Image (cartoon, grey):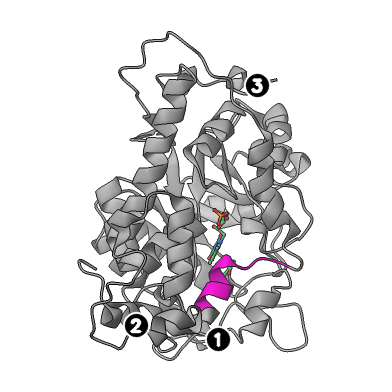
Amino acid sequence: MAEWSIAAVLKTAGPQGPGGSNPSLSAISSPGMKCPLMPFPNSKDLFDIPDFERAAKAVMSPMAWAYVAGAAADEITLRWNHEAYEHLRLAARALVDVSKIDTRVTLLGRELAYPILLAPTAYQKLAHPDGELATVKGANSAEATMVVSTMSTVSMEDIASSATTPLWFQLYVQPDQAFTQDLVARAEAAGYQALVVTVDTPVLGPRYQELRAGFTLPAGIERANLRGRATSTGSHRPTEATIYSQTLDSRLTWKDIDWLRSITKLPVLLKGIQNPDDADKAAQSGVAGIIVSNHGARNLDTSPATIDVLPRVIAKVGGKTPVLVDGGIRRGTDVLKALALGASAVLIGRPYIYGLAVDGANGVASVVNILRRELESAMALCGRTSIPSIDSSVIWK
Ligand code: FNR
Ligand code: LAC
């Protein structure tokens, strides 16, 4: 939104408006009125990811906030995902010519301008009325690769027709195999460049923020890729009194990965590998890449921080297959640490949703550009001018 007005905020935040999470804003304002008291007139006044997080909390409905920011059970892994980065220290270097920093990387045979991708996140219309269409525009302007969720609220075809940037498709294998095959064929036909199969969610973790906020998909927000099916208006949440969800296949095993690889020419990556033994199996199975992820701590609480898992995965499969990581990345220094520990690239989830909620496409682009600049700054201060020059000696031991 070009200008910050309460009307725009209300539109963005949905029927509950900003007052739901920030009563002081509804007390001082009425729809249509420009609000000089707003602490964040637009995303130009937000400088880092924590700024975006605070601003997003103020504009999102309580239900949307609970869904996005929440995690499983006591949210201990959510905290660890962040804290583990804090405990890693960086080794500064002096007197290196850092007047040029090159962040390009080659992944799956293609060059990316920098190694930060947008992780798949569901239901983006909860954060902004344009949902994934705003995100892809932000990704276009920041030259970011976007991984589109099976649970997007705009169809994968419509997202693809607005994209100038590379897209990958995240697949939730569906209980109906023919429909899964159809989703894969659609992703190929729409020009997606990779298939990211999420393997950490046979069932969801108990998400109490979501439950307390009474999560339901509001009328008018659909799971657009499932259009025409009974499940298009439901949600990811388990059906009553069970742990199972109608749109997650709890029977998924390694043989399904072999099957998927046999039906597509796209490179297949596995997202949600958290155990070095599984990483080993994945590399042996010949997948094109692994994403070390605990689903943003939304499933198995008290599983370790992903940045703590990464070195053990690299010890098993480093050099055999590209390893990416996500979870808890909020700073360019976090990105540098992940690369130093062997990641080929990282993904961010919540941070760009915060950008989306606050300022649509501009907010998404701002979040990515902030992280990109922070990464460049951290590289320069550690005396590294290119991604291949980043190794484990960047971490202070
Ligand atoms: C997710 N994530 C996710 N993963 C996936 O494979 N398919 C999906 O549809 C979703 N949906 C989703 C929604 C929301 C609101 C969040 C926060 C996360 C997990 C996501 O891809 C990623 O693994 C984490 O978000 C990474 O952690 P951070 O960056 O949010 O800390
Ligand atoms: C989530 C699912 C839909 O984490 O991936 O909410």
Examine the rendered structure and indicate whether residue 21 appears above or below residue 297.
Answer: below
Determine which residue is flagged by label 2. Answer: 10
Residue closest to the eye, 334 or 287? 334
Q: Nearer the viewer, residue 322 or 257?
A: 322
> Which of the 4 quarters of the picture holds residue 98?
top left
Q: Position of residue 394 (x, y in %)?
A: 57, 21
Please report whichever mark, 3 or 1, sits nearer to the chain's N-terminal start.
Answer: 1
- State whether the magenta stretch is mostly helix, strand or loop: helix
Magenta residue check for 55:
no
Which residue is the site of mark 1? 216
Q: Is residue 107 above or below residue 158?
A: above
In this orientation, does residue 133 appear?
yes
At 69% from the left and 86% from the top, the residue drawn is: 239
- Around disc 2, counting alpha carbons within 10 Å, would you say few (fewer than 14), some (14 to 19), or many (20 or more)? many
| Left or right, residue 327 beside residue 388 | right
Which span of residues is magenta-colored?
64-72
Nearer to the camera, 220 or 7: 7
- In this rendering, the answer to whether 120 lies above or below 315 is below
Q: Residue at x 54, y 51 (%)?
A: 262
On residue 302, which mark appears?
none
Q: Mark 1 and mark 3 in contact (Cβ < 8 Å)? A: no
Discs 2/1, front: 2
Label whose residue precedes the other's in the sequence (3 or 2): 2
Residue position for label 3: 396
Residue 271 image offset from top left, x and y in percent: 59, 51
Q: Who comes first in sequence, dot 2 or dot 1?
A: 2
Q: What kind of residue is marked 3?
A: Trp
**Residue type for callout 1:** Thr
Q: CA distance from mark 2 to mark 1?
A: 19 Å
Q: Secondary structure at mark 3?
A: loop
Residue 48 x/y as whole percent: 42, 49
Q: Please tell me which residue is depicted at 43% across the width and 65% down the height of the picture.
A: 55
